[in-house]
C-alpha cells in the first residue's frame, strides 16, 4: 500500500500498547501520540498481529512513517494481549520493541466490555447470562480456530471473563518476549495519577519527560445502561480471586483488586 508519507518505506514500530481492552488504552495512546519525539501510525488499532496478519509486513509498514533519528513510532491494539498467536508473531517481527500493558480491575473490565458489546449490537443476553454462556461461546475457538472471521468476532466480543485472566496472558507473552521489555501498569493508577503513570512510560521507552496537552480520559464509552449488581459482582470476584493472586505473584505486586473505579 502507498502510505501518506509517499514512496519511502515505513519503519516498524518501536513499541506497542498491547491492551487490555477497556483498560484505558485510548487515553494512554493519546498521551504518547502527543509527545514531540513520537509519531504514531496512521490509526490507533492496526490489528496486524491478529486480524490482518495475512496482509503481510509491507502492508503493516505502510501505516508507519519512514525511520527518523530520535523519533519513535507505535500503535495500540488491545486484542494483542489476549490473542494466543500474537506474542509469537510480535516477537518474530519486532525483536527489539518494547511493550506496555494496562490492566484494570477484571470485574469492572468485564462489565465495561459487556456494555461495549451491547452498544455494538452483538450482545443480546443479560450480563450474568452472557458470563455463563462465555465458555460455550468461546470453546470452538480457544485451543482451536483463532483465525477465522467467526473466531475473531467471538473472541473480541464475548471474552468478558477470559480477558480478565491477566496472568495467563502475560505468561504467554513472557514465553516469547523478555519480560524486561514489557511494562505493566494498573489502569486505576493511571486514572488516579496520570502524570506519574505517563512518566513511568516515558522512562521505560527512553523518551524525554513531557507533559501532554491535557490528561483527559479518552473514551467512547456511554453512560451505564444498567447497574452492576451485587450478585454479578460477587460471582466475578470469586471467579477472579485465584487469578489475581497469581498475577500478584507473577508481577511482584503488593495488591491487585478490588480498587475503587468509577470508569465505565
Image (tube, rainbow, N blue to C red):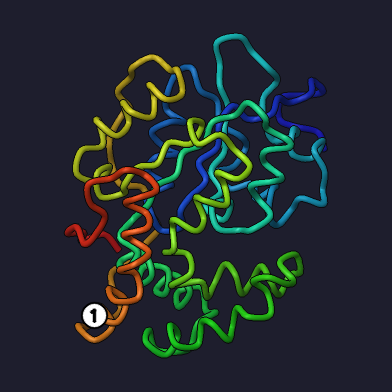
Q: Quadrant of residue 39?
A: top right
Q: Residue at x 25, y 78 (%)?
A: 233
Answer above or below: position of 159 versus 250.
below
Question: Number of callouts in the render?
Answer: 1
Q: Quadrant of residue 225?
A: bottom left
Answer above or below: position of 16 versus 110.
above
In the rendered image, residue 242, in percent from the top left (x then y), is placed at 34, 67
Answer above or below: position of 25 versus 245.
above
Residue at mark 1: 234
Q: Quadrant of residue 119?
A: bottom left
61 or 19, nearer to the observer: 19
Q: Which element carries disc 1, helix, strand or loop?
A: helix
Q: Quadrant of the C terminus?
A: bottom left
200 or 174, nearer to the observer: 174
Q: Residue at x 17, y 59 (%)?
A: 260
Answer above or below: position of 169 versus 182.
below
In the rendered image, residue 226, in percent from the top left (x then y), is placed at 27, 81
The residue lying furthest to the top in this view is: 69
Amino acid at each position: 500500500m502507498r502510505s501518506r508519507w509517499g514512496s519511502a518505506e515505513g519503519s516498524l514500530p518501536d513499541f506497542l500498547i498491547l491492551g487490555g481492552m477497556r483498560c484505558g488504552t485510548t487515553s494512554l495512546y493519546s498521551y504518547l501520540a502527543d509527545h514531540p519525539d513520537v509519531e504514531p501510525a496512521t490509526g490507533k488499532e492496526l490489528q496486524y498481529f491478529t486480524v490482518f496478519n495475512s496482509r503481510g509486513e509491507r502492508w503493516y509498514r505502510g501505516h508507519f512513517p519512514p525511520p527518523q533519528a530520535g523519533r519513535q513510532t507505535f500503535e495500540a491494539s488491545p486484542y494483542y494481549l489476549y490473542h494466543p498467536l500474537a506474542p509469537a508473531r510480535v516477537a518474530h517481527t519486532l525483536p527489539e520493541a518494547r511493550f506496555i500493558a494496562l490492566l484494570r480491575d477484571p470485574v469492572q473490565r468485564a462489565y465495561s466490555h459487556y456494555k461495549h458489546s451491547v452498544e455494538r449490537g452483538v450482545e443480546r443476553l443479560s450480563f450474568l447470562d452472557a458470563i455463563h454462556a462465555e465458555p460455550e461461546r468461546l470453546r470452538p475457538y480457544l485451543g482451536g480456530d483463532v483465525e477465522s472471521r467467526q473466531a475473531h468476532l467471538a473472541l473480541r466480543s464475548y471474552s468478558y471473563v477470559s480477558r480478565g485472566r491477566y496472568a495467563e496472558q502475560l505468561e504467554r507473552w513472557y514465553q516469547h518476549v523478555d519480560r524486561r521489555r514489557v511494562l505493566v501498569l494498573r489502569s486505576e493508577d493511571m486514572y488516579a495519577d496520570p502524570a506519574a503513570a505517563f512518566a513511568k512510560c516515558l522512562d521505560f521507552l527512553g523518551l524525554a519527560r513531557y507533559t501532554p496537552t491535557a490528561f483527559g480520559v479518552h473514551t467512547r464509552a456511554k453512560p451505564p445502561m444498567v447497574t452492576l449488581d451485587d450478585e454479578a459482582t460477587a460471582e466475578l470476584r470469586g471467579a477472579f480471586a485465584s487469578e489475581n493472586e497469581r498475577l500478584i505473584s507473577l508481577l511482584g505486586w503488593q495488591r491487585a483488586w478490588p480498587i475503587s473505579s468509577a470508569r465505565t
